[in-house]
Amino acid sequence: MDKEEWKQLLNEIYSCKRCPLHATKKNYVAGKGNPNAKILLIGEAPGREEDIQGEPFVGRAGKFLDVLLKETGLSLNEVYITNILKCRPPENRDPMENEIEACRPHLEKAISLIDPKVIAALGRHSMNFLFNKYNIAGGKISMLHGKAFPVDSIKGRKYIVALYHPAVALYNPQMKDLLKKDFSVLKDIRNSYNI
């Protein structure tokens, strides 16, 4: 990865005013982990704790994501974690289309620079974003979760994985085991393709 290009991307994120969310956020939330990782996890938008700390997945959902990664045998050094939106929507509401479009260039550039082999969508908004980007036939996340979709690009084969957002287990504890099972597909892909 070109370190200067990465630094430029972060500067663009930290000065972005492409949508109204920049005026209501406390901090921009770019990402965390290893930008040279082969596995990229994309959530939807920063929540309250993320907005305060300026880092993705540090709240309750983030703690569960840590558990899921650990049980999958992945460390923070082996993944990069970001969101579609880099600013918190008020009251943690869903991202709006105009906000997604405003943040699209940041995420597109991050995907290009990181050049991951596996991109995991955490939640339906990120799944829809990735399925549109890679021309994968869509559907409901309830039908597609835990599945990997191979796509070929100029830079080689990638795998797009649809996963429920870890926050779903906070509202419905019965989903914890399903999420653990779904996350195991990341381990399977990594082991099968030496990623």
Image (cartoon, rainbow, N blue to C red):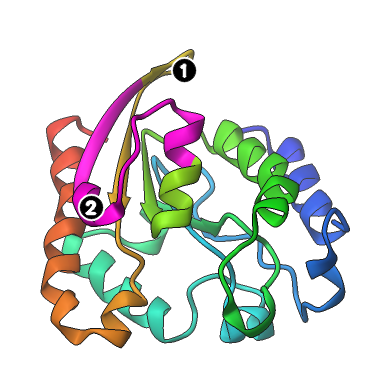
For residue 9, above or below residue 90: above
Mark 1 Cα shell of 10 Å, populated few (<14), some (14-19), many (≥20): few
Instruction: State the extent of the magenta-drawn residues as a range.
Output: 130-151
Disc 2 marks which residue? 145
Q: Position of residue 105 (x, y in %)?
A: 71, 40
What residue sits 69% from the left and 80% below the top? 90
Element type at marker 1?
A: loop
Q: Are marks 2 and 1 in contact (CB under 8 Å)?
A: no
Q: Nearer the viewer, residue 82 or 193?
A: 82
Task: Choose top left, top right, bottom left or bottom right for residue 104.
Answer: top right
Query: What is the quadrant of the C terminus in the image?
Result: top left
Q: CA distance from mark 2 to mark 1?
A: 25 Å
Query: Is residue 44 rendered to the left or right of residue 2?
Result: left
Disc 1 marks which residue? 155
Q: Position of residue 56 (x, y in %)?
A: 55, 70
What residue sits 20% from the left and 50% below the top? 143
Front tag of 2 and 1: 2
Is residue 141 one of those drawn in magenta?
A: yes
Query: What is the quadrant of the N terminus in the image?
Result: top right
